Image (cartoon, coloured by chain):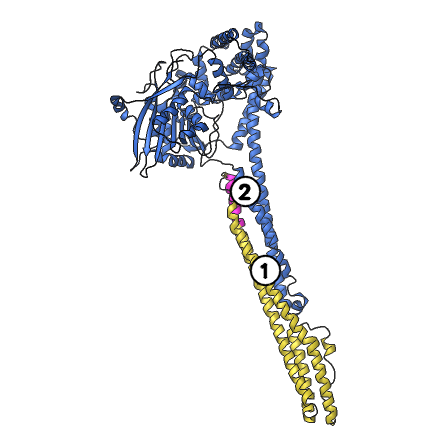
Chain colours: A yellow, B blue
Amino acid sequence: MPAALGTTAVEVAARARASAREVEDVVALLLLPAAGAAAAAGVSIRRTAAAADDAAAEVLGRAGGLGAATAQAWRSGAADAYRARLEELVRRVRADASAVEDVATSLRRHAAAVEARAAALQAAATTALALAGEAASQGADARVGERFARESAALARAARDAVGDAVPGGIPGLRGLVRGPGW
Amino acid sequence: MVSASRGSSAVLLDETRFVLDQVLGAGRAVGAGLDVRGGAGGLVVSGTAMTEAATVLARTGGGLLDRGAPLALAATAGGPVAAALDPAGLAEAQVAATLALARLGDSAQECLRLAALLRAAGAAYASAEEVAASAAAGARDAVAGTAGHAVGALARRPEVVLGGGAVVLGAVTGAGLVWLVVRGGGLVAAVGDGLVADLADGRLDAGERAGLVADVRGLPGTGLDLLRGDLATVGGSALDELSTAAALHPEALELVIGGLPAAVRGAVGAPPGALARRLGGEAQPHVQVGDDRLAWPPADVPDLAAGLAVVLTQDGALRPTDVRVRREDDAATMADLAGQLEPATGTEGLLALATPLAGGGALSPGGRATSESAVVVQRVVDAGGTTRFVVVVPPTQTTGSMTSPETTNPADLGSDLRAVGHVPSAASRSVVLALQEAGARPQDQVLLVGYSQGGIVAAQLAADPALREVARVDAVLTAGAPVGGFDLPDDVAVLSLEHEEDWIRATDGEANPATPARTTVSRDLTATGDLDLADLRADGMAAHDLDLYRETAALVDASDDPSLVAYSERVAPYLAAPGTSVTTQVYRAERVPPR
């Protein structure tokens, strides 16, 4: 809700400073930790993707290693049937390697998405802190206070949207934190 | 009852041979009437290869399961923050990981399944081979042992031997072949028991020895008398009947001879050799007499042949004499032979080199005991300067009495007996001396070619590690030779040509092993029309003819069977080729002094 008309400049400035502190709290307690956790999650996912890449390479190597299981010295109808089955197994294991590569690809895509969310949270935090700093430094000016009062509402919406974009399901406690004068 | 056991034993034999064929594989028909067993193209069960493959599969299966670990982590990668920030991306990764895990699990299971199958197949092969071979040999030995036991019992009641022998014969076999088991086993057993006991205790004084020699010398005569009597009783006429019967039923002969040791053991009350070994009984009584050995009771055919050789050498009848070898330097003789000893261009050409050595050939003594044998040696130097040797070992060149004191030809029946007994003979020594005379060195590779006795001696030399001090046997070609009992090194390529109706090749009582290194070509001459029953009735040895074996060799040269092609490639360096020089030399060998 915007600040009420007719309020004294001192009151406006006080409310602006209070809002600025609350915004700083939201940034410090929510946005920055969320952005950090998201960045760490991205690193973790990429590490898992790299392990999946290694696994795919090893599975491919295992497929090649099955060439040593042809038992060429064994010759009979049963041996021919065994080798046909072994060839099929080699094809399957090569396909397994591709399937493991698919896992790595999916994980990298997942990591990229998480990293994008982390960047958005970081950007929201930066914007919020900039606006809050401006409000705190010029809060005595009633015009500025009026503007901040308006813009703090916009900031709150921007922060909410930023978090909303970054965390589609919402972050528990965010709504409780983002409330107060003018929000 | 012997008659009852005969029926069931015969059925058992048929069944076990059938199982053996089914499990181990009979030969494969390759056209032109040839049947091929073993060799590079044959059924090969390599326990080592199967075990190694199973190990690779098991390791791969375990590795695939291990590789699932990082995929399992994909389900929780990034923790709850990532799950909250990008639930759709996480779900996609989780689905991919689940699918990959399932695939890896399936593949790992298939690896482990195949590994288990390989191990089971290897064990089954080994077990089947052992069980089938053991069953066949066991059934054979059971028949022979029973017959021998019966004869042993009868021998202790002389009054029934003459009349009862024929009854036993008829009851046990219904055919004349098992006569050898029944009569021969009993006779040899009676003498051998005493001989071994005396030799082992060192109690063989001059008088005892003379008595023993008399017994031994009496063996052939006693045996022949018994044979004539028995044949007359059952309607037979002469030894020729036996030869014809053997030609018509060579497999039966192989069984009979294979069963002889068991018959002897049965006659002296000992269990069959295989059973004795399985029961972990006392060590086989074994006496070494110079190069010879005497194992009593005999466990196998080589034991029996070696034992007979020892028995027959007690008065010098088969005494292993020294051998003198000389190079044939007569230019006219060598010129006459030139056309017959042309460098070979194939298997047929190699076997043709034995023609002058066989009956009627220019290097054959015409059966005279007082004569020299001949060994043909070809020195082959290829374009790269590598020297190889082709050595053609003579067949039996004299069938004179084994006890003749005038015998000088090393290739006699005594050498046959000793070669089958796996003990050195004058014939084998003459080949070694000829190789040394020809300048062979330990690193030089040798192809041994032998027809009939030549094949036995060739196999014997190939199996003898001592020959490696003279030269390295690389390949062997035999025709009409009983070589199944020789344990030949895996690095020696062996091709054995056998005619179904040639009973000589069955006289060791063992079929040739089928291994990657050993190929056996069988040819049914009556099926192909090369011989008919009338031919065999007229001449029980008709299928042993060298010219027929050369025809079989020509069919081998024309065959595209993988085993035969592989053998041809193996012996190619020994054949005439551009840039290769071949020098042929004949060596004459004689016993010094005569027997």
Q: Amino acid at mark 1?
A: Ala
Position above or below: A85 against B146: below
Can residue B181 be seen by looking at this rendering? yes
Tell me the crowding category of disc 2: few under 14, some 14 to 19, or many 20 or more residues within 10 angstroms, Cα based: some
Where residue B346 sits, quadrant-wise, is top left
Task: Please name the residue shown 52% across and 32% down the image.
Answer: B24
Check the picture and name the quadrant holding the C terminus of chain B. Answer: top left
Mark 1, secondary structure of its residue = helix
Where residue B284 sits, quadrant-wise, is top right
Q: Is residue B272 left or right of residue B447?
A: right
Q: Is residue B489 magenta?
A: no
Task: Please name the residue shown 59% across and 45% down the image.
Answer: B113
Q: Amino acid at mark 2?
A: Glu
Bounds of the magenta span?
A77-89
Position above or below: A13 against B181: below
Mark 2, secondary structure of its residue = helix
Can residue B229 be seen by looking at this rendering? no
Residue corresponding to mark 1: A51
The chief SS type of the magenta part is helix
Chain under disc 1 = A
Q: Which numbered disc covers residue B300?
A: none
Task: Please name the residue shown 51% across and 46% down the image.
Answer: A68
Q: How many marks?
A: 2
User: Do tags 1 and 2 sit on the same chain?
Assistant: no
Chain under disc 2 = B
Q: Is residue B118 left or right of residue A149?
A: left
Q: Which numbered disc covers residue B52?
A: 2
